[in-house]
Image (cartoon, helix red, strand yellow):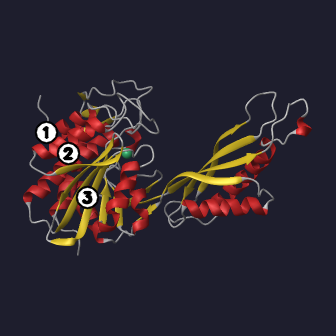
Amino acid sequence: MAFSEVVELARALVAIASVSPQDRIQWSHPYGEEAIAQYVHDWFVREGLNAEFWSVAPGRPNVVVQAEGQDRTKTLLLSAHLDTVDVQGMTIDPFDPVIKDGRLYGRGSCDTKGCLAAMMIAVRDRIRAGRLPHNIVFLASCGEEHNMLGARRFAVERGDAITGAIFGEPTGLSVVVAHKGVARLTLSSSGRTAHSSAPHLGQNAIYPLARAISLLEQYGQSLSEAPGHQRLGCETLTVTMVNGGQQANVVPDSATAWIDWRLLPGHSAAQGRDELAEFLKQHGFSDIDVMFYNEYGAMETDEDAPLVLQLRRTVEHLTGNSETTVVPYATDASAFGGLGIATVVFGPGDIRQAHTPDEFIELKALEQGLAAYSGFLANAWFE
Ligand SMILES: [Zn+2]
């Protein structure tokens, strides 16, 4: 049985393994985005459009398609990521895109190859139709599931040219106008090793860190009692990992704790780090180092921004529901948070099926996603 173009394209994308290689130096199947980037690139070229690889790091490409409009000072970005989460523990064959009971199964079907397929077709059709009111850029990004490598690089290279952006993620066709950011911090203390039978000769790095950790529990608690954000709620701070010492009979000279801090819009990871360092200093822990090793910015867009209104009108037409929403997870939109542009996360599929052992997307959702992106692109969104 033949399926529609968007279903067949999503199916072809699922069949190409593209598990995020994370920090690996070398990788092979099923890791890496090169094969899927090649497919996306070649698909656009076959369809008569110009597509380019923008190398982000060795073996880590973004694919970019650009078209100029009448007003070249304004550029709409549509973006979806190429990579998926890993496949351990899956109960289906991750790369066999089975279609059954109105669903397409496979790793990435929901997050976010369904969105990617729908966006590719909508962008192709709109560019082919011509008479674009403004520029359109399509970005298929690498590395979203780890550190948003591709989107970050794109934001550095082209961010200042972008006036509005839609990031395709499975939001069930709800228009997401805000999400929290994340700061990943480490607290480290150092000491001096000694034989554990004579601990007074050393300086144990674990004790001060352990005391600081109990203080962090209070700090996290105080965040949950702060006023917070009308829709996103409060910030959270959690100690997620602890590591210290080398051997059971040696006084440890180093200890580290990892912290996950979910930040509200307007509160950066650098600010968080400085506040935490100050807090610890005030409580006598000036020897503990606070560093951040990863961060994702929060995102918040005005509900009445022209891009948001236009998208809401399109969705209302399709589903009868144009409510905006907020989500707890960070996305590629994080990379654009500091640019002050209208940004939304929007796409077909249900986040409950993302990252699951039997990931799938409803075929109906794929069709609706395509209709939504196409409907949005059919109208000028800049007033
Ligand atoms: Zn995703």
Q: Is residue 138 above or below residue 267?
A: above
376 relative to 229 in the view: left or right: left
Quarter holding ligand 1 = top left
Q: Is residue 175 visible?
A: no
287 relative to 83 in the view: left or right: right
- Residues tagged 1 and 3 counted as in contact (Cβ below 8 A): no
Depth check, front residue: 29 or 275: 29
Disc 3 residue type?
Val
Residue under pointer 3: 315
Q: Is mark 1 within 8 Å of ligand 1?
A: no
Q: Mark 3 to mark 2: distance in Å?
A: 13 Å
SS category of the residue bearing label 1 = loop
Disc 1 residue type?
Ser
Q: Mark 1, residues whose alpha carbon is within 10 Å: few (<14), some, or many (≥20)? A: few
Q: Mark 1 to mark 3: distance in Å?
A: 21 Å
Q: Is residue 52 above or below residue 159?
A: above
